[in-house]
Image (spheres, rainbow, N blue to C red):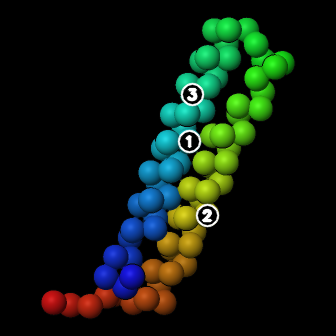
Amino acid sequence: MATQRGLLPLVGMFILVMSWIVHGLILVVMVSTNSFDRNLYWLCIPFTLLHVGVLFGFVGIMLATPLGQGYKD
């Protein structure tokens, strides 16, 4: 893990971008169908992705410092 210190923040960033895209798609579908009342639970998906992405990013940043610079070949 010490050789790939930026992997967890990169995964977190990818999940955050996916959350942003999914959030936009769900809102466009909800506006186009005028069904805010019945489909509000679909907004849980992007919010869950958002929180998981932030968690991965924070864990990656917290692990990067104790792991050090990594092994030099």
Q: Which residue is mark 2?
A: 55
Q: CA distance from mark 3 to mark 1?
A: 9 Å
Q: Mark 3 belongs to which amino acid? A: Gly
Residue at image point 63% right, 40% down: 46
Residue extending farthest right: 37
Q: Which residue is mark 1?
A: 19
Q: CA distance from mark 3 to mark 2?
A: 21 Å
Q: Which mark is residue 50?
A: none
Q: Which mark is residue 24?
A: 3
Number of other residues with Cα within 10 Å of mark 2, as a class: few under 14, some 14 to 19, many 20 or more:
some
Q: Where's residue 26, x and y in %? A: 62, 25
Q: Where's residue 49, x and y in %? A: 60, 48
Q: Earlier in the sequence, mark 1 or mark 2?
A: 1
Number of other residues with Cα within 10 Å of mark 1, as a class: few under 14, some 14 to 19, many 20 or more:
many
Q: Are marks 3 and 2 in contact (CB under 8 Å)?
A: no
Q: Is residue 28 above or below residue 4?
A: above
**Left or right position of 3 against 57:** left
Q: Are marks 1 and 2 in contact (CB under 8 Å)?
A: no
Residue at image point 57% right, 68% down: 58
SS label for mark 2: helix
Q: How many marks?
A: 3
